[in-house]
Image (cartoon, rainbow, N blue to C red):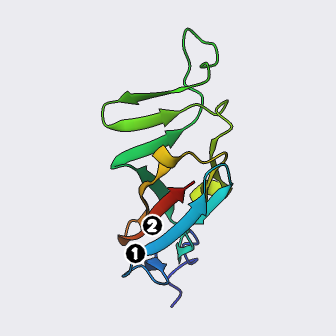
Amino acid sequence: SEQGVPCPTCPTAPPSITGAEETRNITVPAGELLTLECPAAAVPPPHIEWQWQGSLLQVGARAAGGGRAGAGAALLTGALWVCQEDARVRVLDGGRFLRLRALLRTDSSEFSCTASNALGSTSLRFHVDVHG
């Protein structure tokens, strides 16, 4: 007897990231571009979140009176909000990449990405050292 049509969106594989068990150390000169990749795989594709300096990084324009948010970042309830207009920080490809432009020495920090779906989660850590 048939059990019905398979569920294409039902979770069948928890997230996995190659090398998730070790921290990736990256050294980059100030003023350069840095792209961090979170190569997570899962079925269905995982939700990916980035943390920077211990705070959840939320990227996007926040509505203010129905309008678009202005450029800049503010620390709100434990999340670091960075508006889309801030071209220095971008989350790309659904969270797979975190791009930082015109790096400053103060950007030296711990970064991490966490991939999750209904079956679990996994994280990848980066230690970024900006010099010069």
Q: Label 1 belongs to which residue?
A: 23
Judged left or right of residue 40, residue 71 is right
> Of 21 and 132, which appears nearest the observer?
132
Quarter of the rendering containing residue 74: top left
Quarter of the rendering containing residue 14: bottom left
What residue appears at the point 64 percent right and 18 percent down from the top-left corner?
Answer: 68
Q: Determine whether label 1 and label 2 are within 8 Å by CB.
A: yes
Q: Quadrant of the C terminus?
A: bottom right
- 84 over 64 or under it: above or below: below
Residue 129 makes an appearance in the image = yes
Q: Give me the disc on residue 126.
A: 2
- Residue farthest front in this picture: 132
> Of 90 and 45, which appears nearest the observer?
90
How far is the residue under mark 1 from the one under mark 2?
Answer: 5 Å
Give the amino acid type for the residue marked by disc 2 in the picture.
Answer: Phe
- 20 over 115 or under it: above or below: below
In terms of secondary structure, where does tag 1 sit? Answer: loop
What residue appears at the point 66 percent right and 48 percent down from the top-left corner?
Answer: 31
In terms of secondary structure, where does tag 2 sit? Answer: strand
